[in-house]
Image (cartoon, rainbow, N blue to C red):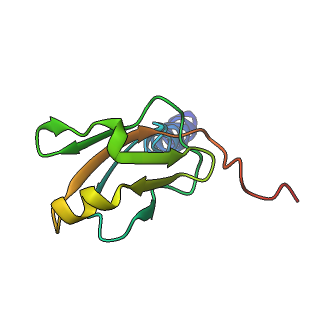
Amino acid sequence: MDKKVFKVIAAVCCCLSFSLYSQDLSNARLRYIVPTRDTIRLDSLSVIPGSVEVRAGDSLLPARYFTLDFSKSLIWFEPSLLKELDSISLQVFFRVYPIAFEAPLF
């Protein structure tokens, strides 16, 4: 009887340990976008200010080419940049808060 109880407890613990690793607890995000329009929503959660990097290939895109609304998680690109980057994929790395500040509270 004791061996059966031990086996059941070991099986339950094993299953619980696997389920703990299924959640991604990181707040880091990486999006690949093609700027075909001036405004793009990055995520459903609010972006942490100062955490955004936009890359075109290996080069970092200067901040003067885009504007961010951190609470709404929106990015706007300059019209001149949209013409230059026709169908070029950009990498956007950013971190998010665990909540959306623009979401209704009730």
Residue at position x 57%, y 34% in the image: 2
Work out whether 50 lies above or below 24. Answer: above
Q: Residue at x 53, y 40 (%)?
A: 96
From what the image shows, is residue 19 above or below residue 33? above
Quadrant where the C terminus sits is bottom right
Residue ID at (50%, 36%): 3
The residue at the far front in this view is 80
Q: Is residue 3 visible to us here?
A: yes
**Observer-nearest residue: 43 or 54?**
54
As drawn, which residue projects farthest toward the top? 50
Viewer-proximal residue, 2 or 58?
58
Position of residue 77 measured from the top left corner of the image (x, y, whole percent): 37, 55
Q: Is residue 21 toward the left or the right of residue 105 in the image?
A: left
Vertical placement of 33 versus 58: above or below?
Answer: below
Q: Position of residue 24 (x, y in %)?
A: 45, 43
Given residues 50 and 103, the one toward you in this image is 50
Image location of residue 30, percent across then percent down: 33, 46
User: What is the quadrant of residue 59 in the picture?
Assistant: top left
Q: Is residue 28 left or right of residue 43?
A: left
How many callouts does the rendering have?
A: 0
Quadrant of the image containing the N terminus: top right
Q: Which percent across, then down, holds residue 11?
A: 47, 43
Q: Is residue 85 visible?
A: no
Left or right: where 81 falls relative to 16 = left
Q: What residue is rendered at 49% in x and 46% in y?
A: 68
